[in-house]
Image (spheres, grey):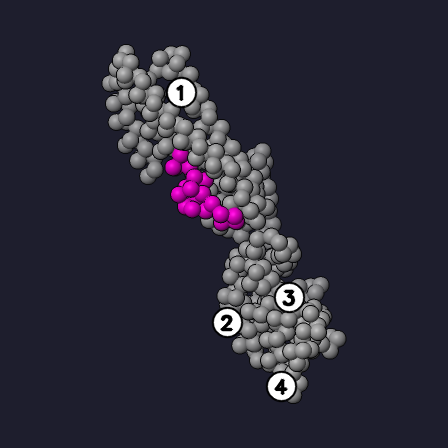
Amino acid sequence: MAGMNKMLITLPMIFAARKLDGEDPNVVYWLRVAYFGIQGVVLMVVAYVYIISSTAIKGYENRLIYVPQPAQPFGNSDLKKKFTETTFGKHVSSQVLSLLGSTLFGVLLTSGLHFYRGMIVGLAMQSVMGPLNLTDNALVKALILGGKRREGTLKPEDKIFKEKTVDELTAEDEIVDSSGNAIVRKKKSFEEILLNIWDSGADKSAAPVDITPLMDEINKSNCNFKTEEKGWTSLMILCGLGVEGCNGCISAIQRVISIGGDPAVKDSDGWNTMHWAAFHNSVEVAKVLSSSNGSLWKEMDAEGKKPLEVALAENNIEVSKFLQDLEPSDRKISNEGLRKRK
């Protein structure tokens, strides 16, 4: 459809440009003013995209994506569709450099043909096609027209390159590296997905973790799955990440519980999900867990500690106060006691 729209603009432009009088100094002058003025604006937009692109994708640079290769003219439709494996950051960088390079090359080529060969049709054509091609660029659409200029607002899930994630690949897709060599990928196990999500959230200064791969795989049969070494469940991972550590944490926890996820399940240290929330000072998570299972705060871990004791040991005052309110009145720790533990 986009190609057809361009054709509807290009053909009339070609006929109109051919009628311009290249011998008339006024025509040549105003064509130059229009062309170089418009291309100056185009170059400023491209430079701006170049500058802000690395900031806009911050936190998502290392996400693996699979970008479809351009369709070949007269290609065999029975062949598998090829996807190039790369990282989101590398692909954005290559695309913005390609945009900058092609724009500069186009300006230099058109200018050279005009000044050395007297061509004026190119000036007229590129005065229109330059901005049109710019607004059709995926990065310009997302960053400028789509408003994704702020830090970390451009994400792989926006699919601006029609890319896929590893979980979206099918048997009909062929994966190749940047050199065109085939890559054989094994689908990740549920445990790998869980642990990768947790590892991604280890850096608290980084952007919130994208938990989409986990939420896409979770179902009734695996919602209480425990990792082999530590006995962690998906609910524990989500509670540990908390609202600041992952996107859509609360709704994800509620969804897992709704399909059968048990917040009372314990890991190898005897911690249930409330212990995890207490350790990571996740008050909002603790409230959701308490509304789902009102006795979680009572459970003791392998060392005989309740979630409140875990929170106090970590000086997590906010979640400590919430858990303290769940205790019977005769067993509550005074506010003075809480302050002493800061």
Residue at point 61%, 72% (across, down): 319
- Residue 52 coordinates in the image, percent (x, y): 50, 40
Q: Which residue is mark 4?
A: 328
- Give the vertical position of 190 relative to 259 (above or below): above
- Residue 127 coordinates in the image, percent (x, y): 34, 26
Q: SS at mark 4? A: loop
- Give the vertical position of 250 relative to 56 (above or below): below
Report the Cα–Cα distance between label 1 and label 3.
60 Å
Residue at point 60%, 50% (across, down): 186
Report the Cα–Cα distance between label 4 and label 3.
24 Å
Task: Determine crowd level at label 2: few under 14, some 14-19, many 20+ residues with C-alpha closer than 10 A.
Answer: few
- The residue lying toward the viewer, choosing from 172 and 52, is 52
Report the Cα–Cα distance between label 4 and label 1.
81 Å
- Residue 73 coordinates in the image, percent (x, y): 41, 31
Q: Which residue is mark 1?
A: 110
Task: Determine crowd level at label 4: few under 14, some 14-19, many 20+ residues with C-alpha closer than 10 A.
Answer: few
Residue at point 58%, 72% (across, down): 286
Report the Cα–Cα distance between label 3 and label 2.
23 Å
| Residue 298 position by quadrant | bottom right
Report the Cα–Cα distance between label 4 and label 2.
29 Å
Mark 2 vs 1: CB contact within 8 A: no
- The residue lying toward the viewer, choosing from 323 and 294, is 323
Residue at the outermost right position: 303
Q: On the rendered structure, is 321 left or right of 71?
A: right
Which mark is nearer the camera, 4 or 1? 4
Q: Which residue is mark 3?
A: 280
Please provide the residue range marked out in magenta.
134-153
Q: Earlier in the sequence, mark 4 or mark 3?
A: 3
